[in-house]
Image (cartoon, helix red, strand yellow):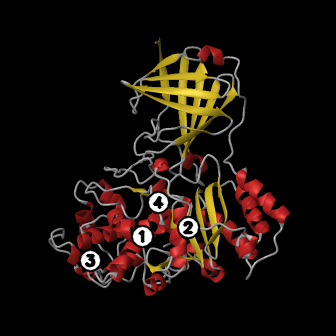
């Protein structure tokens, strides 16, 4: 099944590239106003037996890798020993998890088992008697909750694209799709399976995943400010769509490392943790860290580790042998490369007991952590013709996004772009060759169809490539992706081209699907 995981990445990237059509968005509150306490204890690396030099080696490899790293947090013996965010990402921002959401959904199933409300050997059909097709077929009849958990339902392709495209309910669509193989005989990474797990939670409790997990997982672990996308039927998307902070990812890993215990309370049964994180099935043959076996919505790793992971490089990595957890967010077309960087640097720096304090190494590490930043494009911060274009308002030809006007403003600090659509004007700010964070969380005005299906704060940089070409770069700091906006301003003409970060960084180059914006000759 080597190709299936890659197919999932392509699907995830197809509409930036998120899971395309999200008909309903629930709970999109202002997360930066709901920042929770950083209640994981902090300690120096050496006090927990971790070499600061090894963390510096990780940072050096990460920074030279060409990968867009967004954040990491390393825990040893339950203490945060290193943490960093590449500007413009910051600790208080939630981050899109993609399929790392699946591990949270699996946790909900584990909680139901602990409460005695669910046996994972129960047939899936039994939960949805009113949603079944007229002739369910033998394979669907044999499908159990455990098959959903282990991605062994017998489907020949991921069901989620057809579920999203359907005018019927996602549950009925799933149950009506063909099940080509006997359940338990065929591993296939299928996000629709995870949605059905969330639907089972609702059938048993009358609560969405978000509602069910709030008092049982999120509140005990101090996870708040999160949000989770929903289907048209109001259920959380389950297999993707959850946004939490980097520290929250680390907390989930620490909970599993502690065999389900948290501050003296038993959140999950130890037996569940062992099952969920063990190889319950073979997975994708000859595909590196995806070929080590699959548990209950967790992947096994080389080196005896396990992880929850999401497209483009979202990781909750648990290293039991080292009593360590590493949480990572980022964007990469090569997820194996990002994991190899971790394997090659971090574990080698861990020792039993504490290490002698090396003040020089520690200070160097702290300095490097403070300096972390995504690279910015550099050209020139001034243009000989910028005064001509300042406050000039262009009227645009009709376009698919309904944008009518664009107006630029320039100052010593940066560029201001006002985007007019009817009575609404959206203003974005960009720093000259430095990241400037915009204040509001909102949908991206240049998104086009299906791009960035959730609102996010953005950060932007600006530079002049030449006297008539202004390049604006955007990062969605509560999501994964970015955008490059190239504005050619010459005389009374304006052309604006786009290149999303998935198309820009893909191993096989693809074109951005959005058409360029072009001004009409009339000046307003």
Q: Upstream in the sequence, badge 3 or badge 4?
A: 4
Q: Nearer the viewer, mark 2 or mark 3?
A: 2
Q: Nearer the viewer, mark 1 or mark 4?
A: 1
Q: Secondary structure at mark 1?
A: helix
Residue under the image location 44 percent in, 64 percent down = 101
Q: Upstream in the sequence, badge 1 or badge 3?
A: 3
- Report x, y in % for residue 20: 39, 51
Q: Nearer the viewer, mark 1 or mark 2?
A: 1
Q: Upstream in the sequence, badge 4 or badge 2?
A: 4
Q: Relative to 295, is 455 above or below?
A: above
Query: In this rendering, does residue 78 appear at all?
Result: yes
Rounded to the nearest whole Å, what is the CA distance between mark 1 and mark 2? Answer: 13 Å
Query: In this rendering, does residue 157 appear at all?
Result: no
Q: Nearer the viewer, mark 1 or mark 3?
A: 1
Q: Secondary structure at mark 4?
A: helix
Q: Upstream in the sequence, badge 2 or badge 3?
A: 3
- Report x, y in % for residue 520: 46, 17
Q: Check whether the beta carbons of the residues at disc 1 and disc 2 lie within 8 A of each other.
A: no
Rounded to the nearest whole Å, what is the CA distance between mark 2 and mark 3? Answer: 32 Å
Q: Nearer the viewer, mark 4 or mark 2?
A: 2
Q: Decide which of 359, 500 is in the foreground and name it.
A: 359
Residue at the spot of label 4:
98
Residue at the spot of label 1:
217
Residue at the spot of label 2:
250
């Amino acid at each position: 099944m080597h190709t299936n995981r890659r197919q999932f990445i392509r699907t995830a990237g197809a509409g930036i590239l998120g899971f395309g059509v999200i008909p309903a968005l629930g709970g999109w509150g202002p997360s930066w106003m709901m920042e929770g306490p950083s209640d994981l204890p902090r300690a120096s690396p050496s006090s927990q037996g971790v070499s600061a030099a090894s963390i510096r080696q990780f940072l050096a490899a990460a920074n030279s890798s060409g990968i867009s790293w967004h954040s990491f947090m390393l825990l040893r013996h339950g203490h945060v020993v290193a943490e960093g965010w590449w500007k413009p990402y910051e600790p208080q921002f939630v981050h899109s998890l993609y399929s790392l959401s699946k591990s949270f959904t699996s946790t909900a199933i584990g909680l139901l088992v602990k409460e005695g409300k669910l046996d994972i050997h129960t047939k899936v059909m039994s939960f949805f008697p009113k949603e079944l097709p007229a002739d369910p077929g033998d394979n669907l009849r044999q499908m159990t909750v455990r098959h959903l958990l282990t991605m062994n339902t017998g489907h020949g392709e991921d069901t989620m694209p057809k579920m999203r495209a359907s005018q019927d309910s996602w549950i009925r669509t799933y149950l009506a799709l063909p099940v080509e193989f006997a359940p338990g005989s065929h591993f296939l990474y299928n996000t629709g399976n995870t949605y059905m797990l969330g639907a089972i939670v609702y059938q048993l409790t009358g609560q969405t995943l978000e509602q069910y997990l709030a008092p049982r997982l999120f509140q005990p672990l101090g996870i708040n400010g999160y949000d989770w996308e929903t289907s048209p039927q109001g259920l959380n998307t389950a297999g993707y769509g959850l946004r939490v902070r980097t520290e929250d990812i680390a907390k989930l890993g620490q909970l599993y490392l502690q065999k389900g215990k948290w501050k003296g309370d038993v959140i999950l049964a130890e037996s569940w943790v062992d099952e969920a994180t063990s190889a319950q099935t073979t997975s994708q043959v000859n595909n590196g860290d995806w070929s080590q076996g699959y548990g209950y919505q967790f992947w096994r790793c080389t080196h005896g580790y396990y992880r929850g992971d999401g497209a483009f490089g979202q990781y909750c990595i648990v290293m039991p042998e080292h009593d360590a957890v590493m949480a990572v967010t980022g964007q990469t077309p090569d997820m194996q490369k990002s994991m190899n960087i971790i394997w090659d640097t971090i574990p080698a720096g861990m020792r039993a007991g504490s290490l002698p304090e090396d003040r020089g190494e520690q200070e160097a590490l702290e300095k490097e952590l403070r300096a972390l930043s995504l690279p910015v494009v550099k050209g020139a911060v001034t243009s000989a013709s910028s005064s001509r274009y300042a406050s000039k308002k262009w009227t645009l030809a009709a376009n698919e996004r309904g944008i009518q006007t664009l107006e630029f403003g320039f100052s010593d600090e940066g560029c201001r772009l006002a985007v007019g659509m009817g009575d609404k004007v959206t203003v974005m700010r960009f720093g000259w060759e430095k990241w400037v964070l915009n204040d509001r969380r909102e949908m991206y005005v240049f998104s086009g169809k299906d791009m960035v299906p959730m609102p996010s704060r953005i950060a932007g940089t600006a530079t002049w490539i030449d006297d008539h070409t202004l390049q604006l770069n955007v990062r969605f700091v509560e999501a994964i992706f970015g955008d490059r906006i190239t504005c050619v301003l010459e005389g009374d003409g304006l052309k604006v081209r786009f290149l999303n970060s998935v198309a820009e960084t893909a191993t096989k180059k693809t074109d951005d699907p959005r058409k360029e914006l072009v001004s009409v000759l009339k000046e307003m």
